[in-house]
Image: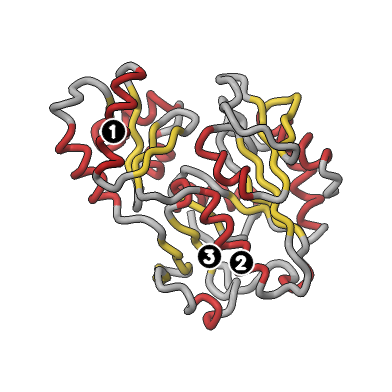
Amino acid sequence: MTFPETAPPIDLAAIQQLIFTDLDGSLLDHYSYSFAPASSALSDLALANIPVICSTSKTFAELQQIRAELANAHPMIIENGAACVIPQAYFSDQLLQQHSAKRQQNDYSYLCFAKPRAHWVDMLAALKAEFDGCWLSFTELGIDGIMQATGLSAEQAALANQREFSEPLLWQGDAAQQQRLIARLQAQGAHVLQGGRFLHVSDACDKGKAMLALSALYQQYSSQPIKNYALGDGYNDLPMLYEATYAALIRSPAHDLPKHQSQASIYITEQTGPQGWAEAVKHWQLI
């Protein structure tokens, strides 16, 4: 599902706050993928001229349906910070031309921070014999395996497999093997992030760096410093939380909170998933 986006849906010059949010386990329920408990908060944020920017391990293809359901026409961060994807005419072309990593695709501008997926697939294939049985990649899982590992439908699993900059691994080895693999990958220039369900192999990019890049574009329109608010529940969210003005760790019904630096600016929710998401937004008194 795609939908045209040709003009900013908000007043860019009046923005004072930005919300950057993880999806699975944060804005979306870990099991049902529903955002219903956060619907009221999302509506209030839209009325308050506060963009909600999806920052996720998901693919561009996956986000089209989700953003349509959210009625969200703002930029997005895909594949754990591998790229910022910006709707056509959201920012001025002159502003975007400053970025050497910019490329155009359909009705979107990409700011790319990672090599193509094929680079990482080839790297992992070369290590497979040494780590036999330790992981199943998305490429190996295929649509049926992704469905089984995630609970996604066949259509959703196909969208999840349309990766452009990274390769997720369903880990099946032990902790020592995982650390050894990470060391081998890092030695070859890869970066590994722990997500809610998968290890994500890509470049040395993360949600925090992508958030700062997008925030800098918004800042060009405002005469006042813009505050970034970030929400997430996993290890792959921590770079974004650390870089934000204010951050929230959302409790999960499926895993413990990630070990994180003790910072006064990180709010830890009492509730889980989208309920915790709405709790954090209210805690910050944004609405």
What secondary structure is found at the residue carrying circle 3?
Answer: strand
Residue occupying image coordinates x 45% and y 28%: 197
Name the amino acid type tagged 1.
Answer: Ser
**In the rendered image of this protein, does residue 145 appear above or below residue 226?**
above
CB within 8 Å, label 1 to label 2: no
Q: Tell me if residue 243 can be seen.
A: yes
State if disc 2 and disc 3 touch (CB < 8 Å).
Answer: no
Horizontal side, residue 242 vs residue 98: left or right: right
Observer-side mark, 1 or 2, equals 2
Position in image of residue 176 (x %, y %): 32, 19
Foreground: disc 3 or disc 2: 2
Inter-mark Cα distance, 1 to 2: 34 Å
Q: First in sequence: mark 1 or mark 2?
A: 1
Q: Position of residue 64 (x, y in %)?
A: 51, 53
Q: Secondary structure at mark 1?
A: strand
Q: Which badge, 1 or 3, comes first in the chain's sequence?
A: 3
> Residue 137: which numbered mark, if any?
1
Residue at image position (81%, 50%) is 44
- The residue that disc 2 covers is 216
Q: Which residue is mark 3?
A: 86
Instruction: Say which of 115 and 104 sits in front.
Output: 115
